[in-house]
Image (tube, rainbow, N blue to C red):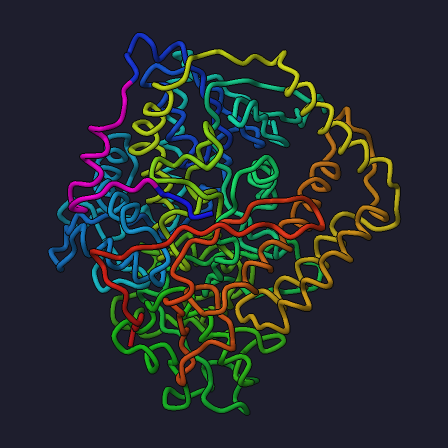
Amino acid sequence: MILDGKCPTGPIEKSWDNHRFELKLVNPANKRKYTVIMVGTGLAGGAAAASLGELGYNVMAFCYQDSPRRAHSIAAQGGINAAKNYPSDGDSILRLMYDTIKGGDFRAREADVWRLSQVSNNIIDQCVAQGVPFNRDYAGYLDNRSFGGAQVSRTFYSRGQTGQQLLLGAYSALSRQIKAGTVKMYTRREMLDLVVVDGVAKGITVRNMVTGEIECYAADAVCLATGGYVNVFYLSTNAKGCSVTANWAAAKKGAFFANPCYTQIHPTCIPQAGEYQSKLTLMSESLRNDGRIWVPKKKEDVGKRPDQISDEDRDYYLERKYPSYGNLAPRDISSRSAKEQCDDGRGVGPGGRGVYLDYADSIKRLGENTIRERYGNLFEMYERITDDNAYKTPMRIYPAPHYAMGGLWVDYNLMSNVPGLFVLGEANFSVHGANRLGASALMQGLADGYFVIPYTIGGYLATVKPGTVKVDHPEFKKSKEDVSARNNKFLSIKGKRTVTEFHRELGKIMWNNVGMARSKESLTEALKVIPKIREEFWQNVNVTGTGGEINQQLENAGRVADFLEFGELLTRDALHREESCGGHFRVEHQMPDGEAKRNDADFSYVGAWEFKGNDKEPELHKEPLKFETIHLAVRSYK
């Protein structure tokens, strides 16, 4: 099937404005007749729930945490992009669009990226009005710093905790609507199924994580803002609760999963310390503004202390390979470059899996106090974890799974191929292509939540009669029975291995075979091994406790079972895409200098997969990508 993204035609500068005008409207008095379910209350979901509540819709918001304030958006550190051009350094909406398209290696929709760039400035105004404490310069103006893949400073930030501050802003707006009664908040609920009636999304089935009760909720539209899936690698920078479960439940009910192989490996993370570590820690990309990345030039120097290696014996490899961008090369390139140095035997630290991020030059130039003002909380976090003082000795970093550019397929209105199902933020695929630029995740989440979905969902609801399906519909009963049966199955197996053991085993296969470097051989091997792990899981997993209580083992069993199915799809997508682009790097497809080699003639499309059942091959649907404003070109940062 050839998919239609329903992108507006005509001059791109007017595309979003014209599209908004052409959307059907819902009368203010009629909005309160409609109910919208919002699953996830991070930046995208929280902003959307608050905005829809403010418009007058009845919103039911769900999160698995005990408060929306604990959404994983809180972990974002470095900043949020916007084309304000406050430093007068040549930025513009068009340049932000260009950098995002190029950064994604020409695998994103132009129209979506233009809209994102256009509303980026509104986001900053909105957040300032909410009281978000962005850093300011000496004169009191909002300050900017640089991030990877850009030659301008367009990143607004709140020290090293920008995600937390933006989430508190969205949470304050959400709390206002909760008190006003337009939003009803359901905490400690995990979505386990999407209820589809006559081909239309009409509700969800959740598990109450406190009582264990299986609950159903009906609405006129369902929005998923449930984040990404890189915990399929087991070790990642994501919170342990982040999963593919909600998206995968939707996929099993007919929603297409787009570009699952586009996963981002973040170049600046604290290296793994041991076999039984449960997650990895992000060190913000903003640190690369003032830090210089290097490894020893000579293999025999890797065992020395960094202060024992002279400057002429250090390889500042990003500055050497990409002089135009230096240490602020995009994430996919920076991560692969770090792996290259370590594979060459010049990595530092335990196992040779690390590179140095050095602040000596910046501290000498700017003073320690300036560095402390910019990154103090990040340096403190690093010292608490590693017991090293990064003001005195270089940080040791290594790439780690961080973000998912792939997600459920959506059209220009953020609606999936299942009518009534909308997907926001990291949960959809739309704007980042094959590689997300730093500081663009927060931009997308708030753009979708504050400035896109409030318009586009109205265009859909205007065509729908409210309240036509209630929870007494047979589809809700069937969904509840299916979810209960699956949970009971987990509890009845009583095998000999824990859920975590299976997750760790899957993660090793995914990281080694489907990680930073992929090949036909490694992917084919993974496709042989993953079904075997899944088969053993359903025969030998041990989930203790009962379903009628707080049971984290049961929760994790469901998430890992979904990863064991989804991991196969991710691998299959990577195998089918015979090219290298962005975060998807096939070793068979690279330039003579080792850079990614795209195949625009055969793969300039969005690959959207339709679930056909376990142990059955999914069906591939394609949405051709057109580039009329930013023309296809070889991506170079040299």
- Image location (x, y in percent) of residue 167: 40, 36
Rendered residue at 49%/50% (across/down): 621
Instruction: Specify the quadrant of the image occupied by residue 198.
Output: top right
- Image location (x, y in percent) of residue 415: 41, 34
Q: Relative to 532, say whether 60 is above or below.
A: above
Residue 417 placement, left or right of 612: left
Instruction: Specify the quadrant of the image occupied by residue 46.
Output: top left
Q: Residue 181 magenta-drawn?
A: no
Q: Nearer the viewer, residue 191 or 625?
A: 625
Q: Nearer the viewer, residue 507 or 604?
A: 604
Residue 347 placement, left or right of 49: right
Q: Nearer the viewer, residue 145 or 52?
A: 52
Q: Which residues are magenta?
A: 6-25
Q: Quadrant of the C terminus?
A: bottom left
Rendered residue at 40%/9% (across/down): 33
Q: Relative to 185, say whether 69 is above or below.
A: below
User: What residue occupies the far top of the structure in this picture?
Assistant: 29
Q: Is residue 258 visible?
A: yes
- Image location (x, y in percent) of residue 494: 88, 41
Q: Residue 15 magenta-drawn?
A: yes
- Image location (x, y in percent) of residue 59: 44, 19
